[in-house]
Image: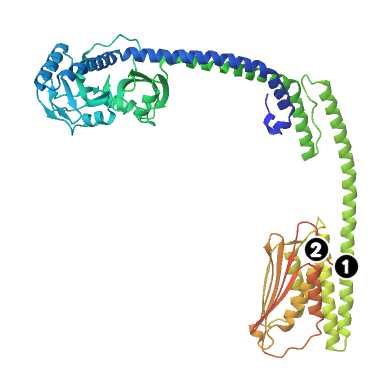
Amino acid sequence: MTSGFFATDLLRGLTFRILLFLSLALLPIGLIAVVQTREIADKNTVNAELSLLAITEQASSTERGLIQEAFGGADALASVVNLIKADSFSCSAFLREYQQNSNLYTIVSFVTVQGDMNCVSSGISADVTEHEVYKKMMAAQQRTANLSIMPAQSKEPVLVISVPLRVNNELLGFVNMSIPERVFGQVSEPGMETRPLALLTFNADGDILTTENDRGVAQTELPKLQELKWYAGQSGRIIRDTNKNGENRVYAILPIVPGVVYAMSVWPEDSPLLRAGATTRLSLLLPVIMWIASLIVAFWALNRLAIKHIRKLGRQMRHFALNRTLPRAPLDGVVPTEILNMEEAFVGMAESILRDEAKLEDNLRQKNILLKEVHHRVKNNLQLISSIMNMQIRQASTQDAKRVLQRLQDRILSLATVHKSLYQDDSLTRVDGGVLMHEIVNQLLSVGLATGSGVKVTQKYEAIQLEPDDAAPLTLLVSEAVTNALKYVAVAEMDKGLIEISLKYTEPEMALLLVKNSTGSGEVEEGTGLGSRLIHAFSRQLNGHFEVIKEPDSYTLSVEFPVPLQAKIVYDY
């Protein structure tokens, strides 16, 4: 149904535009549905979070009751201790009686700001200035709760509840209540259908005070990115984060004693308590699903009625453009009249194009035959002229006359070779420069280089495609250059003579012609300079760069010229 839908320019397609306008038409209704659903989702999410906070408060009721009771008792004792603190014996006896009657605390004490603990329920005085709990109390100078793992007098882990004693805004010391950690595990927990993964209490410094389960489990479930003390400022909130293992968790934070002790419960992300909010959030997708369903129905109808037939008609047109074949069968199915009219118009146009192209091909074939015949006759005429000149060369009375006629004959044969290559090539527009060079050079060597001369000739040609306007000056240039090389090659030592001829690409659209010959120390007949002038003229006609390199034992002629894929400007000389 969707065949070829994404194969064209999507943004300019008929399907895209219709779907776009349909989307704009449905947009206001969709927005209203999304806004209403979002409001319901937000309310349900808030209710779910409030339920989570309420369950956290219920789960931490034991810790809340014990800690708040300890702070209340410490506040009450502070008033009495202020009156009897001077008599350490009476003060210790009073605290001992309170500790025994409460049956909750291991140690009840009063510590002065100097770190002296003379008023203590155990009756054993001590200097606590080096204790970590004392340092934290002095640093805070307000109500604190700290965990002491191995206290000197309680002999077991305790939660130390500290309340400052102030008189006229002067800090005199702290009343401390030591709750053993085992007490929190002995108190029965309220019955709950769903319990958190971990429940813990912590102070404002981020130190864990109590845990419902193992401390190792609680440490693993702590948030990964933020320190625990950061969450003291987030009390009364639900926060989503990852635990130490990278698992998604939901954290509920509540204050037990504001500013001092907080409770935190850890829940899995898919907790049943949060599913109501998640389900409501999923209902946000309903308007989107309805919108997508409307677009699918509209696309299906549009594709079935129009797009499918238009695609098939387009494939027929592309097939005709590539292979010049007409459709074998008309469009099938229930095709709209407008598209049938388009197909009839296309078939009529295609038949007209085929007739016109057939006429053009016949005309072109006739012109190619005539053009090949022209090149063939030009070549025959040039060879006839070469034969006449050959007869004239044999009848010439002087060597100079023979040499001049021979050079003219070489140039005529070079032009004849170009025309021969053109009429043998089917395209009539390009000539293989390597083949052309090889034929011309061999022709010159067969005439100008005697057998057993001792001159080694090396030829290397690449298949460089040349235009006819470049082929003619190149062949004449090669004819002059090779004739000069044969004339001046190693005159004194013929057995060491060397001629190198090459044609190669230097760049994608640049070619280099090299003609190099060794030179000897003997005397050489001085020429007229016509060859050099012709070489310069042919180089200019090729738009090439002409260069001569003279060395003690060699002479090199190089011409670098362009061989563009498109027609180039040629100078007329």
Q: Which mark is residue 380?
A: 1
Q: Is residue 417 visible?
A: no
In front: 249, or 233? 233
Question: In the drawing, does residue 325 fall left or right of residue 514?
Answer: right
Q: Which mark is residue 421?
A: 2
In front: 192, or 464? 192
Disc tally is 2
Residue at the farthest bottom position? 523
Q: Is residue 450 visible?
A: yes
**Residue 207 vertical placement versus 535 (above, below):** above
Amino acid type, label 1: Asn
Q: Secondary structure at mark 1?
A: helix
Q: Secondary structure at mark 2?
A: helix
Q: Residues within 10 Å of mark 2 (few under 14, many from 20)?
A: many
Question: In the drawing, does residue 374 fall left or right of residue 532?
Answer: right
* Closer to the eye: label 2 or 1: 2
Amino acid type, label 2: Ser
Q: Residues within 10 Å of mark 1 (few under 14, many from 20)?
A: some
The x and y percentages for residue 83 are: 17, 18
| Quarter placement of the C terminus | bottom right
**Residue 553 vertical placement versus 502 (above, below):** below
Q: Residue at x 42, y 19 (%)?
A: 270
User: What's the distance in space between the residues labelled 2 and 1, CA to CA?
Assistant: 13 Å
Question: In the drawing, does residue 240 fall left or right of residue 410?
Answer: left
In front: 68, or 502? 68
The x and y percentages for residue 347 are: 85, 31
The x and y percentages for residue 236 are: 40, 18
| Quarter placement of the N terminus | top right
CB atoms at circles 2 and 1 under 8 Å apart? no
The x and y percentages for residue 30 are: 64, 17
| Quarter-of-image position of residue 216 | top left
**Residue 455 vertical placement versus 97 (above, below):** below
